[in-house]
Amino acid sequence: MGNKVLIIALSTFFILSSLVILIKGKSYRISDLSVQNFNSLQAQYIANSGLQITLNKLRFNKNLRGEFNDIALFKGKYSVKITGNDTIVITVKSQFMDKTSYASVTTIWDNITLPPINSGISISSSNLDLKLNGNISISGNDKNPDGTPGTAPAVKGITVETVQDSIRVMSEIPNSVKPNITGAGSTPSIGVSPNPQNLNELLSQYIQSADIILQSGTYSSGTVLGTPENPKITYIVGNANFSGNATGAGILIVYGDMSCSGNFQFQGLVIVYGNTAISASASGTSAIYGSMLVIGPSVNVTATGSATINYSSKTIQNISQKLKTSKFLVSNWVDW
């Protein structure tokens, strides 16, 4: 009887031991599978997070292109490749432990929206003081920056908001200067053109999309605020003085007073605005090809010397095609 009990006990022990070993083996396999799944999910999470980080960087740096490798994130790493111009493809490769994942997206930039361009210079103010002297030239006749005639119809040389303002401006321009205000209609070419209703919205778009942000100061020879091949949106907070051989192309926004002298050259749209009295002056041989807007409750505009403000459809078309907002359409987001 005792031997039978012993045999049964030993048999039970061996069976239970085998079951424990089998259960432990399966636990090890289940645990290993869970770890592998977690690693794969984490790698995928890093890839998508890296893609989102890159999109945010691209929003503030529209020229961001190239390959950037081994960026640490969430105890893993990722590499990113950015290619294209108007349509940009971003591809991210991530690694976490022994797992690799990928994510890719295609983005399309929104083009900048420009206001209607109706003159060489448009002035909007309830209190306007205009002083024009010397051999200055303000023209709405289409002209290219190289001096050759453009092909677009002429616009007014100067526009203001009301008929009363146009009459007053006409009377204040010296007779010696009137022949230099040319454009559509008779000379001097002065007309009425209210500001677009969405001007504040456009200003907000430009400021949010600015490629260059500067503070109040003097910007002289060596200053380059964009080129015709690569125009920029420049926003200056405060008074700006351009002198020497400073150049630029794109949209220049000055929140304050602006003066340009020497041989300052700009191709595109210049906007000078403020909530108080502001002034805009041009002297020397400075030249703006495109158009200029001056906006404020009280505006003082002065032009002397041989300064030029000339409507140019070529420069306006150029910035309309090349300048982008900080917004883009995201499509084809995939991960694998």
Image: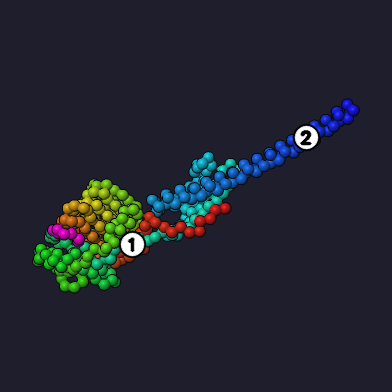
- Residue 40 is labelled as none
What residue does disc 1 label?
113
Characterize the local packing of mark 1: few (<14), some (14-19) or many (20 or more) Cα atoms within 10 angstroms: some
Q: Give the range drawn in magenta.
A: 123-129
Mark 2 residue type: Leu
Query: Could you tell me if residue 17 is visible in this image?
Result: yes
Residue 81: image x %, image y %? 49, 51
What residue does disc 2 label?
16
Mark 1 residue type: Thr
**Left or right side of 51 for 266:** left
Chief secondary structure of the magenta portion: strand
Magenta stretch contains residue 125:
yes
Screen quadrant of the N terminus: top right
Q: Which of marks 2 and 1 is nearer the N terminus?
A: 2
Residue found 19% across the figure and 61% down from its top: 123
| Contact (Cβ within 8 Å) of mark 2 with mark 1 | no
